[in-house]
Image (spheres, grey):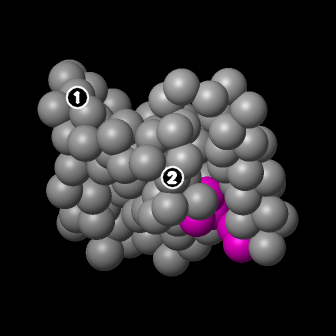
Amino acid sequence: WDLPHSAALSGWLLILITVGAMVFSALFERRLWCRYVCPIGGMNALFAKASMTEVRAQQGVCSGSCTTYNCYKGGPVTPPDGLEAVGCPLYSHPAQLVDNANCTLCGECLRACPHKSVQWNL
């Protein structure tokens, strides 16, 4: 198992990781492979904790006046300001985030929030 010195073994490992990611993506939703299994996803989460930018939501608005939770689940256009969105690809609610480990800063929650509660902070 001399992996660092064998191109064939390194190639098979890369193929195994790629096939594993595709199978997990087909069977499970919300990037299960990237969040829990992939070592690169774990390293990205570690670096994301030190990020200068963040997506956060106002707790009072989310718990008091929101009934749709489109930022989390996705949904159709919601008046007054919510656009059609698929929801968070990582299934994270912006009001519950304490760090960026489970946020890829994709902006789906920003588009979907009808109350403008979700903010991009520096």
Q: Amino acid at mark 2?
A: Cys
- Name the foreground residue: 81 vs 21: 21
**52 lies left or right of 18:** left
Whether the residues at callouts 2 and 1 have beta carbons within 8 Å, the answer is no
Q: Which residue is mark 2?
A: 38
Q: Is residue 105 visible?
A: yes
Q: Earlier in the sequence, mark 2 or mark 1?
A: 2
Count of marks, rendered view: 2
Residue at (72%, 51%) from the top-left corner? 16
Quadrant showing the C terminus: top left
Residue 51's tag is: 1
Residue 36, x across and y down, in percent:
46, 64
- What's drawn in magenta, residue-wise? 28-32
**Helix, strand or loop at disc 1?**
loop
- Dividing the picture into quarters, in which one does residue 94 lie? bottom left
Q: Is residue 12 above or below residue 35?
A: above
**89 lies left or right of 52:** right
Q: Is residue 108 above or below residue 70?
A: above
Q: Amino acid at mark 1?
A: Ser
Residue 109, x across and y down, in percent:
51, 48
Q: Magenta stretch: dominant SS?
A: loop
Residue 81, x across and y down, in percent:
58, 43
Please tell me how crowded label 2 is: few (under 14), some (14-19), or many (20+) other residues with Cα within 10 Å.
some
- Name the foreground residue: 23 vs 6: 6
**78 lies left or right of 100:** right
Please tell me how crowded label 1 is: few (under 14), some (14-19), or many (20+) other residues with Cα within 10 Å.
few
Residue at (25%, 42%) from the top-left corner? 46
Residue 99's tag is: none
Residue 73, x across and y down, in percent:
62, 67
- Name the foreground residue: 95 vs 97: 97
Q: Is residue 17 magenta?
A: no
**Helix, strand or loop at disc 2?**
loop
